Image (cartoon, grey):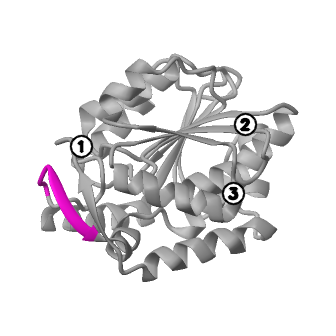
């Protein structure tokens, strides 16, 4: 565990020296320039954010003890390595939830894609956790469909409680070992996917390759924690080299993957 923390610290320092603190300058594809300049860098707030953040705060204060199941995949960040363990909800929220700023970037991307497509979107999330990031993916447009995958029943229950509190009815959760359930589902063509499940090389590539098969040119795949450990960083480099991938953006905490053949083949390191 300490090795991963040291690795992330070193990776962050390296990222600071090799990334651009840019508002889009230097990005040659107009579409991606717009994405960075007006979407990711947007500082406007949306009305639904306050309610979602209230649920985050409730999770951070929750004294409830829940049993978690790890299928031996390392899927939940900061698991203690046992097959089953009990943890406070507040501890899970503190160590595992996607940061507010990152989740709000994802909200803006979904909002933008909804506007561009002018139709309901199909969104997939791998790793529901407490459902806070799921809420950010579902909130931009109630017509969109979010399918989210989670292995631990206790987390599914807590996530569903949060969605009920937020009146989000466009989320469908698939419970069970993601390695199995993802193969069993007949997924529609997806517009956006968020991978925050097993933080290892082989499963991450498996998830990406599975979702790639149901993607189209305008699909965006978000991969969380791309510098979480050496395996995740190697997985990210492998994904960047795949022939179907035309451009990527590395924001350190997460990466964006694009498939549009009209984009210049560039891999950007940026600061959020």
Residue 104: which numbered mark, if any?
Answer: none
The residue pinned by badge 1 equals: 231
The image quarter containing residue 235 is top left
The image quarter containing residue 29 is top right
The residue pinned by badge 3 equals: 40
**Labels 1, 2: front one:** 1
Q: Tag 2 or tag 1, which sits nearer the N-term?
A: 2
Instruction: Name the secondary structure under disc 2.
Output: loop
Question: Which quadrant: the C terminus?
Answer: bottom right
Q: Residues within 10 Å of mark 3 (few under 14, many from 20)?
A: many
Residue 102 visible within the image: yes
Left or right of 24: which side holds 59?
A: left
Q: Residues within 10 Å of mark 2 (few under 14, many from 20)?
A: some
The residue pinned by badge 2 equals: 29
Q: Position of residue 82 (x, y in %)?
A: 11, 54
Residue at position x 85%, y 41% from top? 115
Residue at position x 47%, y 74% from top? 59
Q: Position of residue 43 (x, y in %)?
A: 76, 70
Q: Position of residue 205 (x, y in %)?
A: 34, 29
Q: Kindly report the distance in space between the C-alpha atoms of the residues bearing marks 2 and 3.
A: 15 Å
The image quarter containing residue 28 is top right
Q: Tag 1 or tag 3, which sits nearer the N-term?
A: 3
Residue 130 visible within the image: no
Span shown in magenta: 81-87
Left or right of 36: which side holds 103?
A: left
Q: Is residue 147 above or below residue 40?
A: above
Q: Position of residue 64 (x, y in %)?
A: 35, 75
Instruction: Name the secondary structure under disc 3.
Output: helix
């Amino acid at each position: 565990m300490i090795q991963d923390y040291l690795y992330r610290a070193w990776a962050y320092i390296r990222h600071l020296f090799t990334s651009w603190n840019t508002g889009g300058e230097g990005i040659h594809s107009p579409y991606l320039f717009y994405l960075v300049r007006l979407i990711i860098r947007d500082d406007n707030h949306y009305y639904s954010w306050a309610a979602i953040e209230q649920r985050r705060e409730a999770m951070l204060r929750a004294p409830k003890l829940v049993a978690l199941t790890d299928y031996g995949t390392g899927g939940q960040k900061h698991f203690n390595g046992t097959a089953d363990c009990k943890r406070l909800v507040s501890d899970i929220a503190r160590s595992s939830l996607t940061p507010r700023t990152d989740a709000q970037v994802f909200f803006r991307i979904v909002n933008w894609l909804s506007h561009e497509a002018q139709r309901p979107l199909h969104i997939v999330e791998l790793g529901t956790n407490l459902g806070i990031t799921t809420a950010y993916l579902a909130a931009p447009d109630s017509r969109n469909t979010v399918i989210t995958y989670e292995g631990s029943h206790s987390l599914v229950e807590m996530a569903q409680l949060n969605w009920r509190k937020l009146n989000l009815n466009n989320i469908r959760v698939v419970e069970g070992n993601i390695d199995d359930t993802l193969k069993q589902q007949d997924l529609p063509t997806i517009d956006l996917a968020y991978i925050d499940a097993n933080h290892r090389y082989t499963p991450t590539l498996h998830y990406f390759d599975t979702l790639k098969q149901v993607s189209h040119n305008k699909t965006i795949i978000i991969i969380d924690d791309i510098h979480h450990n050496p395996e995740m960083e190697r997985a990210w480099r492998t994904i960047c080299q795949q022939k179907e991938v035309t451009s990527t953006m590395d924001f350190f905490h997460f990466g964006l993957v694009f498939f549009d053949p009209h984009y210049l083949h560039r891999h950007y390191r940026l600061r959020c």
